[in-house]
């Protein structure tokens, strides 16, 4: 045993000495053994007072010979202290070998993995320190390394050790060395030195030529890396189009944005977008099944994944490496339920019309008609360029307005459209159904669904779906600088160039169908202090410095300075049970606010009762306040789904028997005559080649008669869910010859919809709200009547936010009423005709019960690269599990679940029990979230 201890001690001394030798000599102390053609430790170099000392005993008491140290082809050193060949292995030494392989007794060496003869023969690996390992890597790559005192070879590049760092330099002469990578501003006394210097794209360099100083900027590692501004002369050659493209592709923006949603999120860091969580439509970046465990589907991504970007250049795209060095970087990003989108930076060359970038890229659910993808309507993990915003930019010039030719543009209409300019984008914001983008000339464009008037075009038709962007409606002369969107309701906001604030979309039970300026229109808003929250915007009055929040349709409410002082640098608000709570970062960069948001809470959001828990939380927060600078804070409502029911009425598992079809004797639903199980219906029309614009519905609940029938169901989630928020989504089908009859959804006795519909070629009436998705014919009248349009059966998707009743129930009734006298559409056709003339159906019902008043807080501390993010509260799946280091290996059945999870695990957590609440991750104390070390702006 003493012999083994002695060998381990000697191995540690040898490892330290080898590290010291590498640092002092910039090589490894090895020599070739000509007998076995292997490199061994050169004891002549080591046995001196500088390294091991002249009296170091290299004798191995176990092997009765000198200690053997060998180097492999990569200059890794292995000390063979237990055996040097398998014949030396002794079974009776197994206990001693166990001691030899124990990691506890080693610091500078790594022991063999186990005590088998094969692994003992490998020996102990010498651990190289960080700088020594870098030196070894450069030696392996045949790079030259010098100390400052050493002369270099003129005309060569080399690495020089300075203050324990390796600096890349160019040798202009033996005594004149130029540092290659420099931060801006770069100052150069000799103008030709600049051609050897590299910096960040766009960095400025100041060069002295003929006694005068000139300004240059760095455009990338090209033939002409530094380009002059003003009257300065070029170093080699002028700019060309390829160089412009390379510059924008190499540009790394400073933007740092963080978007956190119910079941995941995305972050923008150093120009790349990283996402995690719900991988529906492949938006979180994972395209295939797990490579380790192929049985797992990547429904959830448990750690941030960098999104792939489509490479548009044909040569570079052939590499089939979507994250190659020529990938697009991003200036802004956002996400919704179906997509992640980002806008690329704009590169505008001063004094010319050369311009590039400002494009929209999206992954998730995209269509090749509108995005540069290789397939038709697809789900893709690869960010692809939007064709509409890419139009006209191929020549790298901002041209005069041109006519759009759809055949060249790949657009849907195949005819020339009016003249328009190229559009360069600066920002993007997204709700669950709509995308809004901001151009560099202050215009806002939207695409997606007009739910709650979100397209901003002045229409209340919630069924309009705009795949090609449209400009929002605003007063003449209004141009915008920034756009925003709230987190838990569908509301957009924007600040214009006069610092006025505008909003549109969902507002307090109603909505605004176009951008509307806040009531106090004379108030100017501080553009640097606008914060998004769960249901309201928070901002500072530029003149009075008082903070305000939005309220109602377009009203504002002032915030008491005792809640948020005028000097706050960041702030957030949240409303719970009618009470507003506040957090802010003060001018001393301390985090303060409502006590309930700054104290230890248990899993059920009650104040901690245990004194130790309170002490830990308070101590952690005090430590962060005293020793760190808080820069940004935001509180999130956990809008998680805790119970859900999905019914698609397909196959033998259909829940049709839980529904009731009620038939009445009249059109006013007053005299119930019978109640039976409703029928299921399959469309009969077959798919043909001209049906590209029509969807093919499968089995539906229906068909039902207008004015005489309703279909009802009561969902019972139990009294523990009393008065919870609930979302009801479903597809409604308008079938055959509708004449403006009204579709009603009645929830817990209250009518939520009264929407009129009409077939497309009606003899008398027109309805601008009739904008559903065409389906293959479910009915018979117009399906067989060739004199009428086949585009009469249409699908409409509804999403209704409401509440369960006091018993935790949701009573749902679907029906269609006839018109009353005087209503638009009232005529001789608007009565409950036979099923083969007009009817309706329901499909894909999704009921989601939401979490009640659970929240969590995240805050950023530090500056720039010293930034760290801390979070506390019920974070659910909003944050990656792995980043908290709280996962429990015993709960992980397969290694791949560390990175991806299936839908079956949606309500399971891999965390330790004390951090688990009903399948949601719970952080009792301010917890460092690894991987988020950026000065994020919370979007």
Image (tube, rainbow, N blue to C red):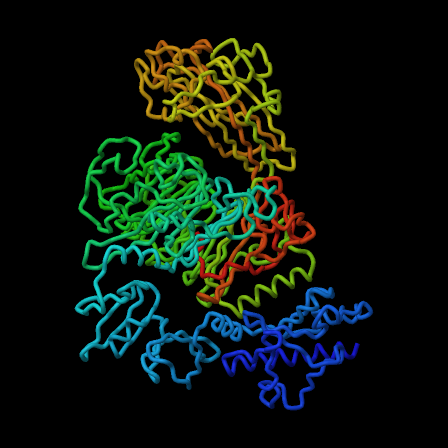
Residue 626 visible somewhere in the drawing: yes
Query: Residue 893 location, x and y as percent?
Result: 67, 47
**Looking at the image, which residue sits at the far right?**
92
Query: Residue 155 location, x and y as percent?
Result: 33, 77
Task: Indicate the quadrant where residue 512 lies.
Answer: top left
Q: 843 or 292: which is nearer to us?
A: 292
Which residue corresponds to the image point at 41% horizontal and 85% vertical from the top-left? 150
Q: Is residue 644 left or right of residue 363?
A: right
| Above or below: residue 713 compared with residue 535 | above
| Above or below: residue 462 compared with residue 247 | above
Task: Indicate the quadrant where residue 601 lies.
Answer: bottom right
| Above or below: residue 902 compared with residue 267 | above
**The N terminus, quarter of image:** bottom right
**Looking at the image, which residue sits at the far front?**
35
Residue 557 visible somewhere in the drawing: no
Q: 620 or 184: which is nearer to us?
A: 184
Query: Residue 481 location, x and y as percent?
Result: 31, 51
Query: Residue 848 location, x and y as percent?
Result: 55, 35
| Above or below: residue 420 compared with residue 562 | above
Q: Is residue 773 left or right of residue 277?
A: left
Numbered label tally = 0
């Amino acid at each position: 045993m003493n012999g083994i201890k002695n060998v381990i001690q000697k191995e540690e001394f040898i490892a330290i000495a080898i590290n010291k030798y590498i640092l002092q000599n910039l090589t490894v102390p090895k020599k070739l053994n000509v007998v076995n053609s292997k490199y061994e430790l050169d004891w002549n170099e080591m046995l001196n007072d500088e390294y091991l000392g002249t009296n170091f005993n290299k004798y191995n008491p176990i092997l009765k010979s000198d200690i053997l140290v060998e180097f492999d082809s990569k200059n890794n050193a292995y000390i063979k202290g237990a055996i040097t060949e398998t014949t030396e292995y002794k079974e009776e030494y197994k206990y001693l070998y166990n001691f030899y392989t124990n990691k506890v007794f080693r610091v500078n060496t790594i022991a063999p993995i186990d005590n088998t003869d094969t692994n003992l023969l490998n020996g102990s690996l010498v651990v190289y320190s960080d700088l020594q390992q870098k030196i070894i890597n450069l030696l392996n790559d045949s790079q030259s390394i010098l100390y400052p005192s050493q002369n270099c070879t003129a005309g060569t590049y080399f690495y020089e050790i300075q203050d324990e760092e390796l600096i890349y330099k160019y040798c202009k002469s033996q005594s004149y060395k130029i540092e290659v990578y420099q931060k801006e501003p770069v100052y150069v006394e000799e103008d030709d030195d600049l051609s050897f210097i590299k910096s960040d794209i766009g960095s400025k360099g100041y060069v002295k030529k003929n006694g005068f100083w000139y300004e240059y900027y760095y455009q990338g590692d090209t033939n002409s890396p530094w380009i002059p501004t003003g009257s300065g002369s070029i170093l080699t050659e002028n700019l060309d189009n390829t160089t412009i493209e390379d510059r924008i592709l190499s540009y790394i923006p400073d933007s740092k944005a963080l978007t956190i949603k119910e079941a995941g999120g995305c972050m923008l860091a150093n120009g790349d977008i990283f996402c995690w969580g719900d991988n529906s439509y492949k938006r979180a970046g994972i395209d295939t099944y797990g490579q380790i465990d192929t049985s797992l589907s990547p429904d959830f991504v448990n750690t941030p994944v960098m999104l792939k970007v489509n490479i548009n250049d044909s040569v570079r795209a052939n590499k089939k490496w979507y994250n190659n060095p020529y990938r697009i970087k991003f200036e802004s990003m956002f996400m919704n339920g179906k997509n992640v989108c980002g806008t690329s930076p704009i590169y505008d060359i001063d004094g010319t019309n050369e311009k590039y970038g400002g494009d929209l890229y999206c992954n998730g659910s995209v269509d090749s008609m509108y995005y540069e993808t290789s397939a038709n309507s697809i789900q893709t993990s690869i960010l692809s360029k939007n064709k509409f915003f890419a139009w006209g930019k191929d020549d790298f010039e901002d041209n005069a307005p041109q006519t759009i030719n759809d055949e060249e543009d790949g657009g849907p209409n195949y005819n020339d459209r009016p003249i328009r300019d190229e559009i360069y984008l600066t920002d993007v914001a997204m709700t669950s159904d709509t995308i809004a983008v901001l151009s560099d000339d202050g215009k806002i464009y939207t695409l997606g669904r007009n739910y709650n008037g979100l397209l901003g075009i002045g229409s209340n038709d919630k069924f309009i779906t705009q795949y090609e962007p449209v400009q929002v409606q605003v007063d003449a002369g209004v141009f915008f600088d920034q756009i925003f969107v709230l987190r838990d309701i569908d509301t957009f906001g924007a600040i214009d160039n006069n610092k006025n604030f505008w909003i549109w979309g969902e507002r307090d039970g109603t909505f605004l169908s176009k951008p509307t300026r806040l009531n106090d229109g004379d108030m100017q808003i501080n553009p640097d202090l606008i914060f998004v929250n769960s249901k309201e915007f928070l901002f500072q009055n530029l003149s009075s410095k008082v903070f305000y929040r939005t309220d109602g349709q377009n009203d504002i409410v002032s915030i008491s300075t005792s809640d948020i002082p005028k000097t706050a640098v960041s702030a957030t608000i949240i409303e719970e049970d009618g009470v507003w709570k506040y957090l802010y970062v003060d001018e001393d960069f301390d985090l303060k606010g409502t006590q309930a948001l700054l104290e230890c809470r248990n899993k059920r959001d009650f104040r901690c009762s245990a004194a130790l828990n309170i002490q830990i939380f308070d101590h952690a927060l005090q430590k962060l306040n005293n020793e760190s600078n808080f820069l940004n804070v935001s509180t999130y409502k956990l809008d998680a789904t805790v119970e859900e029911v999905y019914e698609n009425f397909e196959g033998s598992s259909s829940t049709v028997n839980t529904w009731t079809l009620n038939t009445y004797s009249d059109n006013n639903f007053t005299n119930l005559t019978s109640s039976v199980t409703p029928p299921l219906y399959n469309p009969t029309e077959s798919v043909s080649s001209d049906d590209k614009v029509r969807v093919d519905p499968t089995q539906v609940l229906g068909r039902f008669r207008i004015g005489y029938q309703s279909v009802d169901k009561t969902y019972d989630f139990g009294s523990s869910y009393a008065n919870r928020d609930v979302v009801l989504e479903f597809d409604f089908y308008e079938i055959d010859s509708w004449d403006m009859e009204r579709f009603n959804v009645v929830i817990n006795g209250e009518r939520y919809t009264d929407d009129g519909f009409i077939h497309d070629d009606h003899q008398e009436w027109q309805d601008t709200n009739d904008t559903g998705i065409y389906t293959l014919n479910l009915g018979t009248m117009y399906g067989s009547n060739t004199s009428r349009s086949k585009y009469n059966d249409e699908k409409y998707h509804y999403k209704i936010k409401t509440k369960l009743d006091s018993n935790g129930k949701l009573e749902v009734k679907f029906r269609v009423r006839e018109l009353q006298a005087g209503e638009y559409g009232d005529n001789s056709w608007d009565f409950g005709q036979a099923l083969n003339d007009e009817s309706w159906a329901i499909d894909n019902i999704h009921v989601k019960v939401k979490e009640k008043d659970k929240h969590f807080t995240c805050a950023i501390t530090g500056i720039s690269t010293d930034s760290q993010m801390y979070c506390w509260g019920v974070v659910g799946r909003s944050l990656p599990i792995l980043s908290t280091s709280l996962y429990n290996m015993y709960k992980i059945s397969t290694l791949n679940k560390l990175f991806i999870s299936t839908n079956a695990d949606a309500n399971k957590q891999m965390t330790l029990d004390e951090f688990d609440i009903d399948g949601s991750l719970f952080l009792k104390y301010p917890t460092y979230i690894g991987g988020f070390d950026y000065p994020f702006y919370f979007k």
